[in-house]
């Protein structure tokens, strides 16, 4: 084979390989930006738990939307939701309907997982204690 043909084949191969890596880098950048956007949304959700029924409702909605999409963050979600449930049970004894709905949604999310129960065992036990003491009062 002629050296010019070999050089052309090698040059074309390098060009195709370069295009592949450039495309791959673009895809990785897109995935990273998507993950960053999702994580920002998750962390912004926490500000909605600072107080008030409607804020709590928004925070729960954001976590519900991301619950299955970001299971790696349940270690953050679970203690937050447990404390919100404890607050609603202990501090809001005569729940208005919208707070009862918030509590039901929190309990529903927490009931869907088992693995995190082991990791957050103490928090779950405290929630169960509050729920039991509350049911004994009523």
Image (tube, rainbow, N blue to C red):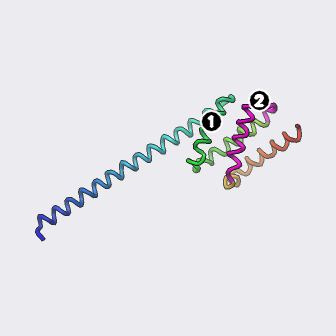
Q: Which residue is mark 1?
A: 59
**Per the image, is 96 magenta?**
yes
Residue found at the far right of this picture: 137
Kindly check if marks 2 and 1 are in contact, taking CB atoms under 8 A apart as contact: no
Q: Position of residue 112 (x, y in %)?
A: 68, 50
Residue at 62 percent of width and 45 percent of height: 76
Q: Position of residue 54 (x, y in %)?
A: 66, 29
Viewer-proximal residue among 76 and 16: 16
How crowded pointer 2 is (Cα within 10 Å; few <14, some 14-19, many 20+) is rated as few
- Mark 2 to mark 1 CA distance (whole Å): 18 Å
Q: Position of residue 48 (x, y in %)?
A: 62, 32
Viewer-proximal residue among 39 and 12: 12
Q: Which residue is mark 2?
A: 96
For the stretch drawn in magenta, the main secondary structure is helix
**58, above or below 79, in the image:** above
**Numbered disc total:** 2
Mark 2 or mark 1, whichever is nearer to me? 2
**83, above or below 111, in the image:** above
**Per the image, is 48 magenta?**
no
Indicate the quadrant where residue 88 lies: top right
Indicate the quadrant where residue 134 lies: top right
Q: Quadrant of the C terminus?
A: top right
Q: Secondary structure at mark 2?
A: loop
Q: Position of residue 102 (x, y in %)?
A: 70, 36
């Amino acid at each position: 084979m002629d050296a010019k043909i070999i050089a052309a084949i090698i040059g074309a191969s390098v060009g195709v390989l370069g295009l592949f890596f450039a495309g791959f880098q673009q895809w990785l950048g897109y995935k990273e930006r998507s993950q960053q956007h999702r994580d920002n949304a998750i962390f912004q959700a926490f500000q909605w738990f600072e107080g008030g029924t409607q804020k709590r409702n928004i925070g729960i909605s954001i976590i519900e939307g991301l619950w299955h999409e970001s299971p790696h963050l349940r270690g953050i979600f679970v203690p937050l939701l447990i404390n919100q449930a404890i607050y609603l049970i202990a501090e809001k004894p005569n729940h208005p309907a919208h707070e009862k709905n918030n509590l039901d949604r929190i309990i529903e999310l927490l009931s869907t997982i088992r693995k995190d129960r082991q990791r957050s065992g103490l928090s779950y036990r405290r929630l169960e204690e509050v729920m039991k003491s509350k049911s004994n009062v009523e």
